Image (cartoon, helix red, strand yellow):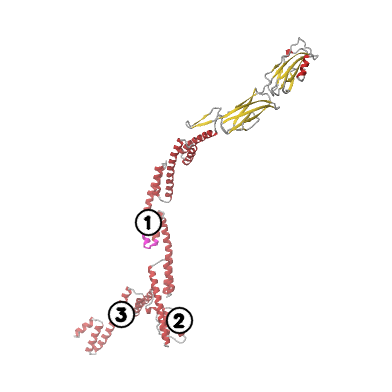
């Protein structure tokens, strides 16, 4: 077997210069199928035609095109294979050769390669579904409906199928974007509806063009239509979910979802009507919830009537399962509270009565009992005020007690200061009046002390030093003052008071305090108990002058009457004694005169009877 590669002219010359035996039939060349560019074509001769002890010789020559590629002889010369590189005709010659190399016969076959057909198809993995608002369900579009601005899968296939490795080169118009270039399956995208022009060229592994194809992909569905469909679907799904949430009493979440559904599909009448109804019901629900919330606050603050009122209104506006039970519980609480109010009110009224009478300890006791029954801020405040008041009263009593002690000691100005502190802690009209009286006493003492000092000064100028010293001393005794003190110090160097000198004090001038009056009364009482009525009367009169009172005035007047009667009785008794002496001496006339004088001094029934018996009555 030999393979010869010549140009066409050379081959023809060789064939016709050699004598071919007439007994040898020309080879019959058979091609297996159609020849295609870039794919190996195989030609054969039948084995029965080959001469015994002969061989087959093949030759190939293009007409006007390129030499084929990958030329080979196989199967003992019976098969001849080559790969066309274009669509130009190729002439193939087959010759029978004897052992001597002589051509016995030959034949030719003109092979015209074809390019492969390339089919472009759209791969639809899942049909597009749109929402039907009237039926509330999806419906699938036909497979040829393609949507804009979404990836569209295209597939290229060779016809007939290519037996070797191959690749594709894709192209499109300016309005269409390709997402890959050299694959069987690619994705394209077009932003708007319209026709996309797509072309593809196939190549074998050696880069030989196998063929090309083109197609028009019609984009009929705008993205806006699909988006609107999705929006309406989402709106309806949101509305159904909102209804489910509402049925499960998740009202706030339901309303929010329903509002979103309506905003997604504002033209949907069913959703719009449902949202309005849901909004109205939600307002009623929220109003009832506010009433129940306020009811809880009222209950916590003890406003049980208001709490019950809110629960009843809330149950009318938006009934709940446990609403009636809550109302019954609130009603019982109101009844129990009213009983407590009555009891606490009685205790509070009792405490208030004690409070008005300034019986603070008792008031505190009943106020505490009232709070124990029912807490009350006003009562608590009142207890705190009373307790503070008691503290102030205790302070006031302490200041008043200290002032009284100072007053008894004659330290009037210090006593006055303590009394002022007392009424500042606890205003007291009686103590305030006493302060005014004490201030008046101090003022009178100051004036009397000044008057005594002036008298002493005048006496000293007239060299009546002893009397002057007495006045200065009395001035100091009535109210301490620097002028009188200096006068005493000056005269004491040369003058002494007589031991029996009586130094007058404030009470001798009718100037004193109630404490002074009480002290003098106590001294008078002691004298009176000892029978010294005269001394007691003097002191009682001083006390009356210092602190006048009807009781003391009547007592002094009664005492004066007793003393007057006593003096009259004593005087009458003295006259009777003298008359008795005269009568015994026989001087009856003088005696009777004295008896009658004693009767004028003080009545005496015995003397009157004696005179009548003696015939001397007048």
Q: Position of residue 384 (x, y in %)?
A: 43, 59
Compared with 374, 93 (above or below) is: above
The answer to which of 250 and 557 lies nearer the viewer is 250
Q: Which residue is mark 3?
A: 563
Magenta-tinted stretch: 351-361
Contact flag, marks 3 and 1 (Cβ < 8 Å): no
Q: Residues within 10 Å of mark 2 (few under 14, many from 20)?
A: some
Q: Residue 101, located in which quarter of the rendered image?
A: top right
Q: Residue under circle 1? A: 347
Q: Which label's residue is closer to the chain start, 2 or 1?
A: 1
Q: Is residue 498 visible?
A: no
Question: Is 495 above or below relative to 17?
Answer: below
Mark nearer the viewer, 2 or 1: 2
Label 2 close to label 1 by CB (< 8 Å): no
Query: Quadrant of the rendered structure where residue 439 is?
Result: bottom left
| Quarter of the image with the C terminus in it | bottom left
Residue 282 sits in quarter: top left
Label 1: few (<14), some (14–19) or many (≥20) C-alpha neighbours in 10 Å: many
In magenta segment, residue 388 = no
Q: Residue furthest left?
A: 615
SS at badge 2: helix
Residue at mark 3 to residue at mark 1: CA–CA distance: 60 Å
- For the stretch drawn in magenta, the main secondary structure is helix
Residue 83 in picture, x, y percent from top left: 71, 22
Tell me the crowding category of disc 3: few under 14, some 14 to 19, or many 20 or more residues within 10 angstroms, Cα based. some
> Relative to residue 139, is residue 584 depicted above or below?
below
Front position in the image: 403 or 604: 403
Question: Is disc 1 placed on a helix, strand or loop?
Answer: helix
- Which percent across, then down, holds residue 220? 55, 30
Q: Quadrant of the N terminus?
A: top right
Q: Going by the image, does 606 lie left or right of 96?
A: left
Residue placed under numbered mark 2 in the picture: 485
């Amino acid at each position: 077997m030999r393979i010869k590669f010549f140009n066409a002219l050379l081959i023809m010359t060789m064939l016709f210069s050699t004598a071919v035996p007439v007994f040898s039939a020309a080879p019959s060349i058979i091609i297996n199928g159609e020849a295609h560019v870039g794919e190996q074509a195989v030609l054969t001769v039948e084995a029965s035609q080959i001469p015994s002890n002969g061989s087959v010789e093949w030759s190939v020559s293009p007409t006007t095109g390129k030499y084929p590629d990958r030329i080979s002889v196989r199967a003992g010369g019976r098969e001849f294979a080559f790969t066309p590189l274009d669509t130009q005709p190729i002439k193939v010659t087959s010759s029978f050769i004897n052992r001597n190399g002589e051509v016995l016969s030959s034949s030719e076959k003109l092979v015209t390669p074809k390019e492969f057909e390339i089919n472009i198809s759209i791969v639809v993995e899942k049909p597009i579904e749109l929402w039907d608002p009237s039926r509330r369900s999806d419906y699938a579009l036909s497979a040829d409906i393609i949507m804009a601005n979404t990836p569209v899968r295209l597939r290229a296939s060779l016809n007939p199928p290519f037996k070797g490795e191959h690749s594709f080169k894709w192209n499109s118009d300016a309005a269409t974007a390709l997402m890959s270039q050299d694959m069987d399956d690619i994705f394209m995208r077009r932003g708007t509806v319209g026709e996309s022009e797509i072309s593809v060229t196939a190549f074998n592994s050696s880069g030989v063009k196998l063929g090309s194809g083109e197609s028009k992909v019609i984009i009929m569905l705008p993205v806006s239509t699909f988006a609107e469909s999705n929006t309406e679907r989402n709106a309806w799904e949101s509305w159904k979910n909102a209804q489910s949430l509402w049925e499960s009493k998740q009202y706030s979440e339901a309303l929010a979802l329903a509002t979103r559904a309506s905003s997604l599909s504002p033209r949907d009448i069913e959703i719009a009507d449902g949202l309005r109804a849901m909004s109205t019901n939600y307002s009623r629900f929220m109003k009832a919830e506010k009433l129940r919330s306020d009811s809880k606050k009222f209950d916590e603050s003890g406003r049980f009537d208001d709490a019950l009122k809110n629960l009843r209104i809330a149950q009318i506006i938006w009934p709940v399962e446990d609403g009636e039970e809550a109302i019954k519980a609130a009603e019982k609480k109101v009844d129990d509270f009213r009983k407590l109010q009555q009891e606490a009110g009685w205790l509070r009224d009792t405490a208030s009565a004690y409070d008005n009478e300034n019986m603070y300890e008792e008031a505190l006791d009943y106020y505490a009992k009232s709070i124990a029954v029912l807490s009350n801020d006003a009562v608590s405040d009142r207890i705190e005020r009373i307790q503070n008041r008691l503290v102030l009263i205790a302070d006031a009593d302490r200041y008043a007690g200290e002032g009284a002690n100072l007053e008894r000691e004659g330290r009037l100005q210090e006593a006055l200061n303590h009394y002022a502190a007392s009424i500042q802690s606890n205003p007291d009209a009686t103590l305030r009046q006493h302060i005014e009286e004490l201030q008046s006493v101090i003022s009178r003492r100051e004036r009397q002390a000044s008057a005594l000092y002036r008298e002493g000064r005048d006496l000293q100028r007239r060299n009546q030093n002893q009397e002057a010293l007495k006045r200065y001393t009395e001035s100091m005794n009535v109210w301490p003052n620097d002028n009188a003190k200096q006068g005493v110090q000056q005269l004491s160097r040369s003058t002494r008071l007589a031991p029996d000198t009586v130094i007058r004090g404030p009470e001798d001038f009718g100037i004193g305090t109630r404490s002074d009056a009480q002290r003098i009364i106590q001294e008078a009482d002691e004298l009176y108990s000892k029978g010294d009525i005269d001394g007691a009367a003097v002191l009682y009169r001083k006390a009356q002058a210092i602190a006048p009172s009807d009781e003391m005035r009547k007592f002094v007047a009664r005492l004066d009457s007793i003393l007057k009667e006593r003096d009259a009785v004593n005087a009458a008794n003295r006259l009777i004694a003298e008359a008795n002496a005269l009568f015994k001496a026989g001087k009856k006339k003088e005696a009777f005169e004295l008896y009658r004088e004693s009767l004028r001094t003080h009545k005496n029934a015995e003397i009157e009877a004696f005179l009548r018996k003696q015939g001397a009555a007048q």
